[in-house]
Image (cartoon, rainbow, N blue to C red):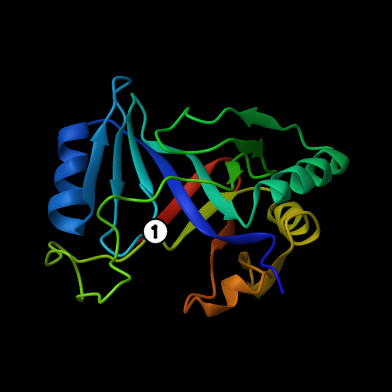
Amino acid sequence: MALKGVLRPGYIQIRVTDLDAALKHYVDRVGLHEVSREADGRVYLRAWDEFDRHSVVLRPADMPGMDYAGFKVASDSDLDIFSRRIAEHGTKIEEVAAGEQPGLGRRLSFIVPTGHRIELFAEMALSDHGPMTRNPEIWREEPHGMRVTRFDHCNLHGPNIDQVVEFFTQVLDFSLTEAAGARRCLYPSSRASQISPCRVFVGLLARGRPSRGHHRAL
């Protein structure tokens, strides 16, 4: 059976007020690897066990926070299917052309009722230094810092979390894996996602102010 639908988290773009301090934290302490620094000021990072080109993007800004989080879908045709379903749901969609981020294909961008921007993409270039698949060693070079392996999930705060649950479950085919008080946890229903040891890809916590974040897990 062919894989389809949303597979896993792909990337997150984070606003930082001190780029040098953020790089010291994410690279030296957390253990991410720097992939590139681009002319617009953004810096692209990846974990040692990730195949894709990057998973964390740091953008210099006056206020810290999350710009958006992107989820990988199985194929470009899935983007068209989700675009139609999101539009039928009444949510405005922006299509971002391929290349706006290095190595990233076209993507769908939209805002959910908590005020967070979520994106879907199908294609990203592979890392030149990703995990070996032929006669592999444990790693290409010994990991450093906290040795994180991947971008795992994000936890978002805001109002209208039940509307967000409805959107993710009815439009994006996620499953609700936990509901306790003001907390909700969501996980894709696709077959590919079942191999992940993590049972949370999006966590939600009810708060009055929109577009807030609690954490992003690596």
Instruction: Judge the density around disc 1: few (<14), some (14-19), many (≥20) Cα neighbours within 10 Å.
Output: many
Q: Is residue 111 above or below residue 26?
A: above
Q: Amino acid at mark 1?
A: Phe
In which quadrant will I find the C terminus? bottom left
From the viewer's perspective, is residue 213 above or below residue 110? below
Q: Is residue 134 above or below residue 60?
A: below
Q: Position of residue 83 (x, y in %)?
A: 76, 41
Q: Quadrant of residue 138?
A: bottom left
Image point (17%, 65%), residue name:
140
Looking at the image, the residue that sits furthest to the front is 134
Q: Position of residue 97 (x, y in %)?
A: 58, 27
Query: Left or right: where does residue 214 sit relative to residue 1?
Result: left
Image quadrant holding the N terminus, namely bottom right
- Classify mark 1: helix, strand or loop: loop
Please provide percent x and percent y for residue 66: 44, 40
Furthest-top residue in this view: 39
Q: Which residue is mark 1?
A: 151
Q: Position of residue 77 (x, y in %)?
A: 72, 48
Query: In screen coordinates, is 194 left or right of 60?
Result: right
Q: Nearer the viewer, residue 29 or 139?
A: 139
Report the residue at 54% width, 69% height from top: 200
Residue at left offset 26%, top offset 65% = 148
Q: Is residue 60 left or right of residue 28?
A: right
Of residue 77 and residue 158, the one placed in the foreground of this image is 77
Q: Is residue 107 above or below residue 122?
A: above
Left or right: 94 with respect to 58?
A: right
> Total number of numbered labels?
1
Q: Which residue in the rendered view is the most extreme toward the right?
A: 88
